[in-house]
Image: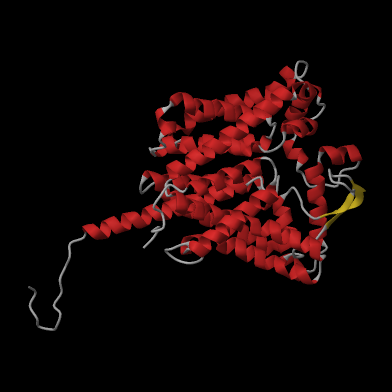
Amino acid sequence: MIYSDERAIPSLTYLVVIGFLVLNAQMWEEAGWAIAFAYASARMLTRRSELGLPYPVIRLLIAPMLIFTVGLPGFYRNDLNEFLKDCWYFTSPMVYIVFGYLVAERIGTMKRLISLFTIGGLAVSLQMLFRVYSNSASLLAANSAENYRHFTGVGAGQAMIPIVLIIFARKTGLDIGWLDRSKALRYTVFVVGTLAIILALSRTLMAVLLVGVLITVPLKKLGRWGVVGAIAVGLAMLAPQLWRLSTPAATQSFFEKSMNTGHEVELQSYDTMAEINDNWRGFEGYKAFEAYNDFSWPEKIIGGGFGTLVNIGFSMNLGGPEEMQELPVLHNGYLYLLVKTGVLGIVIFFAYLVYLTRLGVPQTRYGTAEVKMSGYVLIWSVITFLMTQGVITGIYNKGVLAPNLTLLGAAAALAYRRQVEEEAVFQARQPQILYPRFPGEALP
């Protein structure tokens, strides 16, 4: 029997999830990871239905585990400390997925899960607005988007999750309790969360939020939405020119970076330090691709392994206590995978996204509202992973996508639960057919 250990409201699980979200938003990734790992370990040892990991979550872990296995040969050729760091980065997505699955198994409903993420997201949004208000003078004086984010922080990613979840719930007709009954509360979550994301000056967060909203738009309505989108893009392109004389330097810098996004990630060596600083992701990626080209043919297939470093050719201060010439982590997650796990790791990663897509798309069309909701979460997760893998190492970032990975595991658990319940109801409604106990014996 499944979920037989859920008899009361799991208040301890609620506190664990809120604590996890708060720590992650404060960029205390190690503490958030420790909470997720400890909770998942304890739950696996105390589940009454079956000990260890259930089969549905094992299926979600096959591809990440294969990628992790490909990188293990780095133990024999690279520095042990760097090897262990990469092991942590590559196992973290699995920890968060398991954590999310077991949390949802304990909580039992999507409604409760959305409530928890809404509380966490609203708290993060309000904190972001407070930081902006309390540092307003410094923010107005900031001369770049990077200096601006030094004051605001980068933990606003959780602000978009409740917005997207509420939109998905409204689309699927899922009952979300107090959020359904109070329009003012929903609008507060939308407005405060959107403001927090805009004030964070993060192109990635804005794009991921927009994707989450547009996922629910039916294909037949894309024509009308396409016009609206074209107008929005046009205004966005004109905004830097119109506001250049009236906006702070940090906002100008953000608009210029947005307009320069394509060039910024272009893989080339660049000629001057100014160009390198302005296009760091592209320069960093170029050096990573150079390192990959120097690999032997076996290494090009399976990578240099965990602990492989990328030499940029000179020492540079990247925000740490010491200058660095060899980089252990890259902004471009695809090249990070390529250097550590080769072409094989990239292929497995894309196969994983295809698997999640094939799992999610049918769920958006059939089943209960909760199953459809889970399908939308899976599809949004795939697009989020695709987009962020190119700018912040995606799922292998220390903690930025930890809430998204947790939500992925939770959505899979709740969809599986509803499917099992539907099958049980279907079987119970089937007529009982009695067969003869012995050959030739008549039915009673």
176 left or right of 283 in image: left
Identify the residue at image location x=66%, y=68%: 69
Q: How is the image coloured?
A: secondary structure
95 left or right of 301 in image: left
Q: Is there any visible trace of residue 353 in the rendered image?
A: no
Instruction: Name above or below for residue 428 compared with residue 132.
Output: below
Q: Position of residue 54 (x, y in %)?
A: 47, 63
Q: Position of residue 35 (x, y in %)?
A: 62, 52
Q: Residue furthest bottom?
A: 439
Instruction: Name above or below for residue 320 compared with residue 4.
Output: above
Q: Position of residue 48 (x, y in %)?
A: 43, 63
Location of the C terminus by quadrant is bottom left
Total count of labels:
0
Instruction: Name above or below for residue 114 compared with residue 106.
Output: above
Location of the N terminus by quadrant is bottom left
Q: Judge by depth and name the residue closer to the eye, 180 or 32.
A: 32
Q: Is there any visible trace of residue 34 in the rendered image?
A: yes
189 left or right of 69 in image: left
Identify the residue at image location x=46%, y=54%: 105
Residue 155, quarter of picture = top right
Q: Residue furthest top?
A: 246
Identify the residue at image location x=77%, y=53%: 329
Q: Position of residue 388 (x, y in %)?
A: 65, 45
Residue 3, quarter of picture = bottom left
Residue 212, quarter of picture = top right
